[in-house]
Amino acid sequence: MENNRFAVVAQPGDSVTDLSTPRPIIDEDRLARNIARTQAYMNDHGLNFRPHIKTHKIPALAAEQVAAGAKGINCQKITEAEVFAAAGFEDILITFNILGPEKLERLTALNDRISGLKVVADSATTVDGLSAKFSSRKPLAVLVECDTGGGRCGVQTPEDAAALAKRIHDAPGLIFAGLLNYPKPGAAEAVQTFLAAALSLLQAQGIECPIVSNGGTPSLFEAHLVTAATEHRAGTYIYNDRSMVRAGHCAEDDCAMHVLATVVSRPTADRAVIDAGSKALTSDLLGFADFGTVVGYPEAVITGLSEEHGVIDLSRCTGRRPEIGEKIRIIPNHTCVVSNLFDTMVFHRDGVVTRVEDVAARGLVW
């Protein structure tokens, strides 16, 4: 069901060309290939793989990833993790600093509920808050998040990592579970240098480090270069998107998600307007100057989005141009955000609907 909760989205056997738009559609064969390709790479290099479910937010897809060989899952927020715990997942890593009474209360309930919950911390403030909450409860596993060049969260030096690990190790109610980072692409050497130094300092203190978790789809196929890592995390790879094509991670034919849209207006010869705006394609640019690739019309440029409309510049098109009523497919810049814009996801094989899945963790952002 969609937001109005009245109309059925699709049934198996329907043609995707008959779907009401805008609508993300997922190619089953591309999805399966993406899962298999990544898991095979991890297996070949002896790495555990922990897929990040924020890309799809669908328990059935996480189950497919685990069935292929993934070790546990990665969630970004407590509420996401609660949905996947309810679906039977036990090994869940939440990669976010968790602060505040309400979140900590939910975290304790989740830790009581499943056997393999893990979180991260990058400050004494976060560690001390966790310890105060868990000191008289079932212990919580905590990894130290390290900034190895990504410029987001994380301790800044190996020395800082070792010091915070010791604080976790000594804190009541906490178990030091390892190190974690989210690097910028192409930085495997710097990541390895940082992690190796931190591991050496931990060894000198007699602190065991069972998990070294590296991350990111952009860094996916250089994961084997970070020899200190025991596992890798990635999310976008399952669908892929325009940014992953640009990064050389995949080809357009590996993009499992298309956003189906309808041309609703042709005000001029050089302009088409579609029914997919920022509420369907997202306004994320990710360094692009436009908002997606129009499949079959490579010269078309999606120049602007309002909430419900997308404007396409057709002036560079040398062949036929899309007409009013025509349904087009768009490879979005960023699939993860598209997932969070829809209640359901339609899957198909060769244009025939195979299933419809609820985006169960949609909108769960804390």
Image: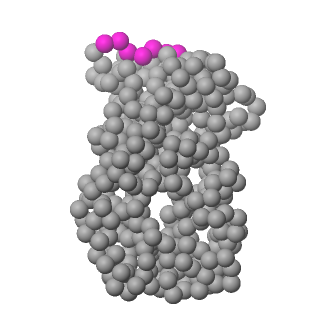
Q: Residue at x 64, y 18 (%)?
A: 13
Q: Residue at x 44, y 55 (%)?
A: 48
Give the position of the C terminus as an image quadrant. Answer: bottom right
Q: Quadrant of residue 149?
A: bottom left
* 50 is within the stretch colored magenta: no
Question: Where residue 345 sits: x, y (%)?
Answer: 59, 35
13 on left or right of 28: right
Q: Would residue 167 be seen by someone viewing this image from the given angle?
A: yes
Q: Quadrant of residue 117?
A: bottom right
Q: Is 94 situated above or below 285? A: below
Q: Would residue 54 be seen by someone viewing this image from the given angle?
A: no
189 on left or right of 91: left
Q: Residue furthest left?
A: 189
Q: Is 154 situated above or below 220? A: below
Q: Is 189 situated above or below 65? A: below
The prevailing secondary structure element of the residues shown in magenta is loop
Q: Residue at x 46, y 40 (%)?
A: 35
Q: Quadrant of residue 314?
A: top left
Magenta highlight range: 319-325
- Foreground pick, 357 / 207: 207
